[in-house]
Amino acid sequence: MTADVGDEARTVHAPAEARRGDASWRVVAGQETRDLWISGRGPVLLFGFSLLMSVVTYLAASNSALNFLEQRETVNLAVQIAVTVGVLVTLIASADAISGERERGTLENLLLTPVSRRAIAVGKLTAALSLWFAAFLVSVPYVWVLGRGVSLVAEALLLSLLVGTLLAVGLAVLGLLVSSVSSSNKLSLSVSLFLLLALFTPTQLPALPQGWFGTLLGRLNPVDAGMNYLDAVLVAGHGWTADLFWLVSPVVLAVVAGGVLIGPGSRMVRLFGGVRAR
Amino acid sequence: MRPMLPVGGTLVALTALLALAAPIAAARAVAAPLVDAIEVSLDRSRHSTAVGDRFVLRSLVSNPGPSATDRLIAHLNVASLTSEVYVDPEDWSAERTQEVQALAPGASAELDWELQAVNAGSFAVYVVVLPGGAATAGTGPLAVSPPLHLRVAGRRTLNAGGALPVVLAVPLLLAALTVVARSRIGRPG
């Protein structure tokens, strides 16, 4: 929660619902989401995302030389951009969630509210994930324009939602963890962006036959594996169940992320940064 | 005076020459022209479809000759009959090369080719059979099927005009929502 919401908002909104235990994360999530979408940078990020999707869609649509398969590849490209940028903005929001509050001097106030630290972490994660779901909604008309001619709209959207949600959940928790241990917000954002870049780079390598080590790395990297799954279904036309092995690492990442939130999630929200800080 | 080549030496030289020439002669004997030994046919000569549709083409590789063939390689190709359409055969079929085991005299092998029409236009699809054995590889001429004349009807829905409403409306709508939300927050009271 940002400083402009103020202590009043927390003391007014939080206690009534927060004392009900489990529901307190919803209070935090609601407040964080309002901060992100009404006074924060959510709409600006989404506007930038829509501009990018518009440019890609127009370039693809105005290329009359595209054959049927290349149109399928274009749908895949649009979906991959939606997933990558959607996950990127989610990661930015989560990487700012704790270190940003700490740097703006609002974390102390937040810790004084009668809300558990785990609820704060879950609430912040939920708010960050709202960016991904918003990016997904924005991508729907673009995927419809590109995919209707090749009967790929429903399939592309469902796959985008599935792969994007798995990656967004996993990487958002990773962003929260980085934010938790970072001594400054700049460091948290830099490390998170570097991590995303490192995970994303292999997806741009040419699709050449690889040795066992390359194949293993591709399957272990959740971003690369997720994109390969999209590729297999949307471009190669494989069935949904034919290449499920590609989804193993995104699913494992999301499950581990859930475990981190349930387990050491309470220790993620700390007044001081650093690995040993309490 | 030049020394005479001994008779023994001449025999050794001749034997060596024969030994070197023997494999070449043997290879020439096996590598009978493929076009005489193999026949390739397709299950149809014309086919009409639409962009995006898949179909299976069946080819028959037979050996009507009196001797067995070597291992063979069958390859599918797609060629555009108009200069405006560029064809990348890899887009049309994921598996364009198949191996055919050696065919005994009178034997034949059926090969199925799954294709997806990715361009609109008029095309020729044919199967070419090449010798693939170690001894016969690189010899020719090749055996080719008669071409299938393929007509693909266009079904293009992706165009700049159709995409323009979405391309313009979505960012404008988001910009308007952002401005409205910001102005409400900025308004006092």
Image (spheres, coloured by chain):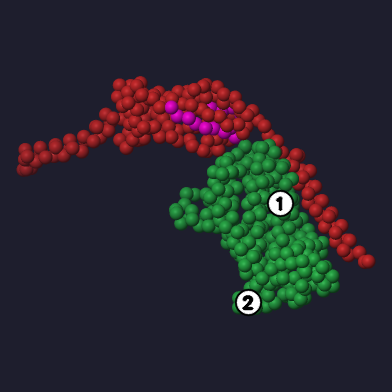
Disc 2 residue crowd, few under 14, some 14–19, many 20+, Cα 10 Å: some
The residue that label 2 is drawn on is A274
Locate residue B165 relative to residue B136 in the image: left or right. right
In which chain is the residue bearing label 2? A
* Tag 1: amino acid: Phe
Q: Residue at x 62, y 32 (%)?
A: B51
Q: Is residue B25 magenta?
A: no
Q: CA distance from mark 1 to mark 2?
A: 34 Å
Locate residue A44 relative to residue B124 in the image: left or right. right
Image: magenta residue range: B110-124
Q: Give the secondary structure at mark 2.
A: loop
Is residue A26 shown above or below A272?
above
Q: Colour of chain B?
A: red
Quarter of the image for residue A30 reads bottom right
Give coordinates of residue A219: x percent, y percent. Answer: 52, 54
Is residue B157 shown above or below A117?
above
Q: Is residue B122 magenta?
A: yes
Q: Residue at x 72, y 42 (%)?
A: A145
Q: Nearer the viewer, residue A266 or A96?
A: A266
Q: Given the current orientation, which residue lies at the most extreme right position?
A: B189
The residue that label 1 is drawn on is A136
